Image: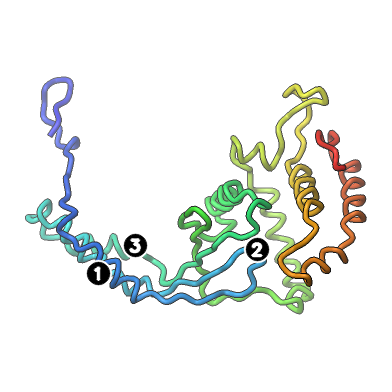
Amino acid sequence: TTKNDNGESNDDGQLTILNLQKVDWEALISQSLTRLTCTKVTGGITNALVRVSGFRDLIPSIKSAVDALLSEHNCNDTTHTSTTSTDIASIIDYNSLLLRIFGAEGMIDRDVETSTYAALCNVSIAYRYLGRFQNGRIEGWLEGFRPLTVEDLQEEPTSLEIAREMARLHCLFEVPEGELREHHCGKRASADGEENGEAQAGLWDQLTSWMEQAKGYTEFRTPGDTERVKSLQLHDIERELRQILELFSVTRPQTPMG
């Protein structure tokens, strides 16, 4: 218990110390892993996607662990058990999640991508950001949904709905201040480098970077991949990119492509 400036007791300042040894964490983790199932999800372009299911089955064991941790502190609280059960169920309110393991190392800034995804989730444009680990991200799983097919995209109602959502994204979503805005919207810089000119979209820097990376490779993982890259005719694509930059950039790229 702490005291305020008048020397009066203040129970709001209590510090609860929990005995973590009351739970066999190794057994809890081991039992939990046996109850989860993993299914590979197809359709990822640069990422490996895995659906992990069975989280509702973990609620009883997690509740028991939390009850054990809080039992000494709440021994006189008759409502403790039901409260804990409700809290755990509200936290684990899903049965499946999507595990995204990043690929295309070096081509995509995953820190920026994940921050962008989280920002979109905050305004309910993207679906549920649950966490990040070193080479991947954890997202919510959309139950009962499937990817759109080419045939779906050719249907007018579907195309109109996509257009509405894209309009909603561009009209209602504001990129957060800071590094994320600088990446997507560019820093305000004049031709001589002073930060008082017009903003240049970060899109151009990203496209230029990808082009330079693509031109830097002469061989790929398989001979078939190498032949496919040659058929892309990168020099023609680079010329088109230059034309786009000249048409739409406020200022030309600081580092011209060579």
Q: CA distance from mark 1 to mark 2?
A: 36 Å
Q: Quadrant of residue 58?
A: bottom left
Residue 246, percent from left and from top: 90, 41
Seen from the viewer's position, the closer of residues 37 and 90 is 37
Q: Image point 59% across, 35% down: which residue?
A: 178
Mark 1 in CB contact with mark 2 (< 8 angstroms)? no
Count all numbered tags in the image, as a single digit: 3
Please name the residue that numbered disc 3 is placed on.
90
Please name the residue that numbered disc 1 is placed on.
61
Q: Which mark is first along the chain, 2 or 1?
A: 2
Q: How is the image coloured?
A: rainbow
Q: Secondary structure at mark 2?
A: loop
Direction from residue 206 to residue 79 in the image, left or right: left
- The residue under label 1 is which amino acid type? Ser
Q: Secondary structure at mark 3?
A: helix
Q: Residues within 10 Å of mark 2 (few under 14, many from 20)?
A: few
Residue 252, percent from left and from top: 85, 35
Q: Which mark is first along the chain, 1 or 3?
A: 1
Please name the residue that numbered disc 2 is placed on.
46
- Residue at the extreme bottom: 151
Q: Quadrant of residue 24?
A: bottom left
